[in-house]
Amino acid sequence: MKIRIKFSKYGAVRFIGHLDIMRYFQKAIRRADIDIAYSEGFSPHPVMSFASPLSVGHTSEGEYFDIAVNSFTSEEDIQKRLQNVMVEGIDILKVKLLDEEEGNAMASVEAASYLVSFKNNINFPKGWQESFMAFYGRRDIIVTKKTKKGEREINLKESIYKLEIINSAKNRESALPESVYMLLNASSGGNIKPAFVLDCFFKTLDFTLPEFGLAIHRIDTFKNIGTPDKRKLVPLIWEE
């Protein structure tokens, strides 16, 4: 049986890398006395599959991983037992027993949504918000992306599914937005990070964001239950 677990990551835990988070959950599952299945072979290990890894320093309320179990009580019981052994900065938000035909978390990821906030001491170019929305409004946004195999040109527009500047009522006359909402491609073959989108835009204004100038929060992670040409994005734990 396969179970999908949704969790949040915040506070000081945001500085813990993905591999250490994996090791942490392996130990937490043992402490929670969950009957997790192990792989076969010379060096057995817990059967786990994490969705899109979160960059160090980012917070999230939409992280997921799958585990295989030998026995199952209930979704509520497993959520409670896991939550009881969590450290501050990680909360278990949902647990779902998956259908047999459901793909694993990593292979299912199609998109992720983010809120990006800016530090108060950034001296933005005047009128950059209008320029940003014009940038998003282009038919094509050809940029160079660095990969493990080198550099290649991509059409960034194809990987931005939605983009919006969100201002609070108090902040509408300010040059500093409350946040930028982005829904981006997060698949294994086309993953785009929100900081990359902003860097590409600000290069068109000959402006460089300061290091550590962004606070990035992942809202949720999505799979596509539609077609490649007509996407229907839903969270990785989704009730029809």
Image: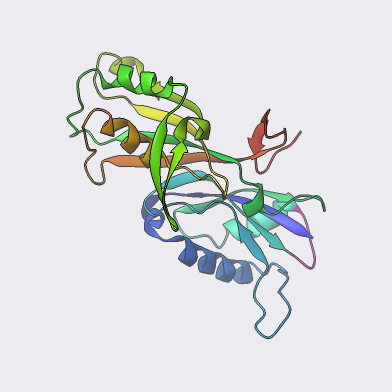
Front one among 24 and 141: 141
Residue beneath the point at 44% across and 53% down = 89
Q: Quadrant of residue 88?
A: bottom left
**Main secondary structure of the magenta stretch:** loop
Q: Quadrant of residue 134?
A: top left
Establish if 77 lies above or below 197: below
Which residues make up the magenta segment?
Answer: 69-74
Is 185 placed left or right of 165 in the picture?
right
The x and y percentages for residue 120 are 22, 33
Is 192 placed left or right of 82 in the picture?
left
Is 48 placed left or right of 10 in the picture?
right
- Is residue 72 on the magenta stretch? yes
Establish if 86 lies above or below 43: above
Q: State the quadrant of the N terminus.
A: bottom right
- Is residue 170 on the magenta stretch? no
The x and y percentages for residue 233 are 64, 33
